[in-house]
Image (cartoon, grey):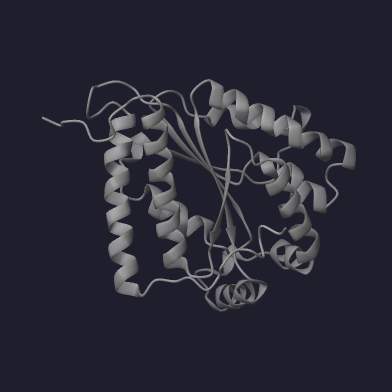
C-alpha cells in the first residue's frame, strides 16, 4: 500500500469558498491557542503544541505555515526553520539541535523541516550511512513518544503534490524575480531523484506513524485546500487533546 498514491490530489476550493473556510478555521485556532496559553478560560496552561512540516519542495509549506500562525499573536507561537546542520551541530546527536525550540506547557512551536531530514535528504543524498539512518526511525519514535508522555501534542504534516505541479511551480518561481531566490540548484537535483525520495517518504510514513504521532498527508496540489486542511487538522488535534484531559474547549469566557 502506498500512502502517497492514495492521496486524492484533485481536491480543491473555489477562491471565495476557500477564503471563507480558512477564515473560519483561523478564528477557531485563535480561540484554542488562547485557551492553551491560559489567556482565556480557566486560566490554566494547556499542553505544549508542536506542529511539524515536511513535504516536497514547492509544496506550499511556507504558505501553509503563514496561514496557520498569521492570525495568532506572535508572542504566542514560535516558528523555527531548519536547514542543513552546521559544523558545530554535526558534533552532536542529530536530535540535539531541535531541543531548544520545543514548546513547554502553554506554548506552541511550528517546525519548518524537522528531525525527519535524517531519513529523507540525509538518506537519499548519502549524508548519513545506512546504519545511521536506519537507526534513526526508532530514535525519532522514542523522542516523540517521550514528548507525548510529557503532554506534548504532536501534529505531523507531509505536504504532497504531483511532479507535474511541482514543475509548474518551479518554472513560475524561476520567472518571478521576487520569488526566484526560493529556487535553488539543490531543488532541481532533488526533483531528479523523485523516485528515491518517494521510497524514503513511504518508509518514513510507515515506520514513524505511531499512536503518539500520526502522520497527516495533505493534498497540496491546490494551495487553498491545503491551507484549510492544515489549520483544521491542528484545531482537531487541540480539541482531541483537551477532551482527553477533560478540559472544555469552549468554556464560559465571562
Residue 81 coordinates in the image, percent (x, y): 56, 44
Of 102 and 75, the residue lying toward us? 102
Q: Which residue is at 73% across, 42% downward?
A: 207
- Horizontally, residue 87 falls left or right of residue 99, namely right
Q: Which residue is at 81% across, 34% downward?
A: 135
Residue 233 coordinates in the image, percent (x, y): 44, 49
Of 64 and 246, the residue lying toward us? 246
Instruction: Establish if 32 lies above or below 245.
Output: below
Quadrant hosting residue 41: top left
Considering the image in quadrants, where does the C terminus appear? top left
Quadrant hosting residue 238: top left
- Horizontally, residue 218 falls left or right of residue 188, namely left
Q: Which residue is at 57% across, 33% downward?
A: 212
Instruction: Establish if 170 lies above or below 190.
Output: below
Residue 70 coordinates in the image, percent (x, y): 35, 50
Res 97 seen here: yes
Amino acid at each position: 500500500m502506498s500512502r502517497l498514491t492514495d492521496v486524492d490530489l484533485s481536491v480543491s476550493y473555489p477562491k471565495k469558498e476557500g477564503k471563507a473556510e480558512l477564515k473560519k478555521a483561523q478564528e477557531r485556532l485563535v480561540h484554542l491557542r488562547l485557551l492553551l496559553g491560559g489567556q482565556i478560560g480557566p486560566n490554566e496552561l494547556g499542553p505544549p503544541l508542536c506542529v511539524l512540516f515536511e513535504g516536497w519542495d514547492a509544496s506550499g509549506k511556507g504558505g501553509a505555515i503563514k496561514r496557520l500562525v498569521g492570525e495568532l499573536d506572535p508572542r504566542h507561537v514560535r516558528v523555527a526553520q531548519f536547514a542543513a546542520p552546521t559544523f558545530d551541530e554535526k558534533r552532536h546527536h542529530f536530535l540535539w539541535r531541535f531541543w531548544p525550540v520545543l514548546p513547554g506547557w502553554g506554548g506552541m512551536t511550528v517546525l519548518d523541516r524537522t528531525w525527519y531530514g535524517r531519513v529523507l535528504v540525509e538518506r537519499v543524498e548519502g549524508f548519513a550511512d545506512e546504519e545511521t539512518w536506519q537507526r534513526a526511525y526508532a530514535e525519532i519514535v522514542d523522542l516523540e513518544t517521550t514528548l507525548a508522555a510529557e503532554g506534548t501534542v504532536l501534529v505531523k504534516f507531509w505536504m504532497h503534490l504531483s511532479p507535474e505541479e511541482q514543475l509548474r511551480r518551479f518554472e513560475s518561481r524561476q520567472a518571478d524575480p521576487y520569488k526566484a531566490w526560493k529556487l535553488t540548484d539543490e531543488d532541481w537535483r532533488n526533483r531528479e531523484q523523485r523516485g528515491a525520495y518517494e521510497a524514503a517518504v513511504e518508509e518514513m510514513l510507515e515506520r514513524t506513524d505511531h499512536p503518539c504521532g500520526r502522520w497527516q498527508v495533505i493534498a497540496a496540489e491546490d494551495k487553498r485546500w491545503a491551507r484549510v486542511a492544515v489549520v483544521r487538522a491542528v484545531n482537531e488535534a487541540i480539541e482531541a487533546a483537551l477532551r482527553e484531559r477533560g478540559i472544555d474547549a469552549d468554556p464560559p469566557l465571562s
